[in-house]
Amino acid sequence: MIEPSKVKEAFNRIEAENYAFRAYLKNHANEDELDEQFLKLHNELFLNYDCSICRNCCKEYSASFKEDELGPVSAFLKMTEKDFIVKYIKEEFGDYQLNVKPCCFLKEDGGCEIETCKPNSCRDYPYTDKPERLFSLLSILDSTSICPVVFEMFERLKDEYRFKRRNRR
């Protein structure tokens, strides 16, 4: 598996190929079969992967919170929900997004300060074990530039589909 620090550079080298593969999947993949393939790869690759070593997702994305997730986090941090929102959240189009990047709850050791009550958007990332992946290939493609596991999934799927790879430098 690719080193977390090298995933962005590797993605940039094959970005056009990845977009071509996404288009190929949109036109040739069976939705249910693709979901099964992603789920199988997700379970296999994340089984022994320690995300705390990487945490690229915590460095690159801003966590999003559902309204009912704000209370538990603010209580955990021993502050009011209103104070939590003022200090940490920007509200856009009804969504509650963390207002900083990288995540201010990311600890030096790769742990999460709010692990016990972190939002589902963090728990579920990179969503490769969820259904309807055919309709979210753009977000998965974005994740291939951040998550070494998703990068590996995409590479393995190219092999499974016998996708003709472009000349790589």
Image: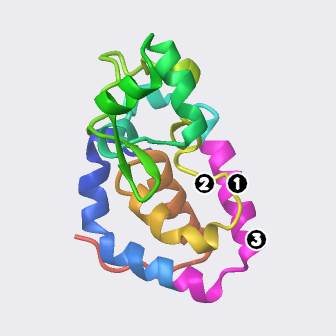
Q: Amino acid at mark 2?
A: Thr
What range of the chain is rendered magenta? 24-45
Q: Is residue 120 visible?
A: no
Marks 2 and 3, how far apart at CA: 13 Å
Do the CB atoms of the residues marked 2 and 3 lie less than 8 Å apart? no
Q: Amino acid at mark 1?
A: Leu
* Number of numbered discs overlaid on the protein picture: 3
Residue 39 is tagged as: 1
Quick one: label 1, few (<14), some, or many (20+) residues within 10 Å?
some
Marks 3 and 1, how far apart at CA: 10 Å
Residue 43 is inside the magenta segment:
yes
Quick one: label 2, few (<14), some, or many (20+) residues within 10 Å?
many
User: Which of the two labelled residues, at mark 3 and mark 1, occupies the earlier sequence position?
Assistant: 3
Q: Nearer the viewer, residue 81 or 65?
A: 81
SS for tag 2? loop
Do the CB atoms of the residues marked 2 and 1 lie less than 8 Å apart? yes
Q: Position of residue 74 (x, y in %)?
A: 47, 21
Residue 112 is inside the magenta segment:
no
Nearest to viewer (mark 2 / mark 3): 2
In the figure, residue 93 lies in which quadrant?
bottom left
Q: Position of residue 31 (x, y in %)?
A: 72, 75
Q: Amino acid at mark 3?
A: Glu
Q: Is residue 65 left or right of residue 104?
A: right
Q: Position of residue 37 (x, y in %)?
A: 70, 62
Q: Position of residue 131 (x, y in %)?
A: 71, 61
**Helix, strand or loop for the magenta stretch, by majority:** helix
Pointer 3 residue: 33
Q: Residue at x 28, y 72 (%)?
A: 168
Residue 128 is tagged as: 2
Q: Residue at x 41, y 27 (%)?
A: 82
